[in-house]
Image (cartoon, rainbow, N blue to C red):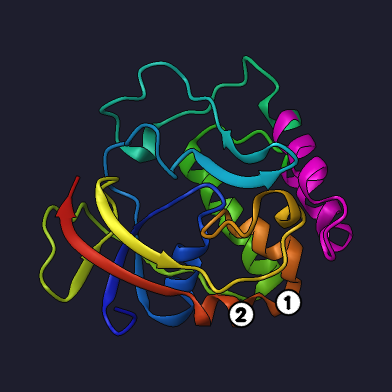
Amino acid sequence: MKNQAHLLPLAYFAPIAHYSLISTSQCLFEINETYQKRSVRNRCKILGPNGVQNLSIPLAKGKNQLPISEVKISYEEDWQKVHFRSLRTAYNTSPYFDFYEAAFEQFYKQKFIKLMDLNMASFELISSKTSITAPKMTKEFIKETDSEIFDLRPKKHKLCIETAPYTQVFAHKFGFVGNLSILDLLFNRGPELFTILKDTRITFNQSTV
């Protein structure tokens, strides 16, 4: 699979599988699609003291059927404070949180208008700490893909992901949880995360559920 090209949505602190593909194969970010609700586009998963936790970015009304480039973020609630506080609660005792805390605190003080801009900034933040290079972006919407491109935009595609195991803060309570947000891997492994990305195994099934 990693010898193929992959078409990925631009996600909010994307899952480990996305970064595994980005760091080991040719990828494209789809920035001309229509917004898909309840997806990695505006939510990420971390492992906290109560188990897996979804961090979701609230969006302005009318987002459905809009181009992803036009979807706006809602600030009616202080979700930034909640997200950063959740990260601190989950990873304060992880080996590398102290090294990155200031950068993430600053990130969550910025008020992006559009979701796509925030997602790109989230990738750039990870890139600044890991030197992972951003994929190229689509110039227009790719309606159909050929056999040489794996389309990972639809939520219903099945990915079989075997994340290479690493030490997690709450593994003693929940066991190892794979394919969380890249945040989990960054705070727990720091600059050593590339070994995990390289050793993560991903297979793709064209069938849907």
Q: In the image shown, does 166 or 28 lie closer to the viewer?
A: 166
* Quadrant of the rendering where the C terminus is positioned: top left
Name which residue lies at 47% across and 28% down. Answer: 72
The region drawn magenta spans 82-107
Q: In the image shown, does 120 or 139 lie closer to the viewer?
A: 120
Mark 1: which amino acid? Pro
Is 46 contained in the magenta span? no
Residue 16: horizontal and vertical position, in percent?
A: 52, 63
Magenta: predominant secondary structure element?
Answer: helix
Q: Could you say whether the residue bearing mark 2 is in a helix, strand or loop? A: helix
Is 97 contained in the magenta span? yes
Position of residue 184 relative to residue 82, above or below, is below
Position of residue 142 relative to residue 40, above or below, is below
Q: In the image shown, does 71 or 17 lie closer to the viewer?
A: 17
Name which residue lies at 79% across and 35% down. Answer: 85
The quadrant in which residue 206 appears is: bottom left
Q: Could you say whether the residue bearing mark 1 is in a helix, strand or loop? A: helix
Q: Which mark is residue 194?
A: 2
Q: Residue 105 carries which label?
A: none
In the rendered structure, are the residues bearing label 1 and label 2 in contact, judged by CB atoms less than 8 Å apart? yes
Distance of label 1 from label 2 (alpha carbons): 7 Å
Instruction: Evaluate whether residue 55 shows in this view.
Output: yes
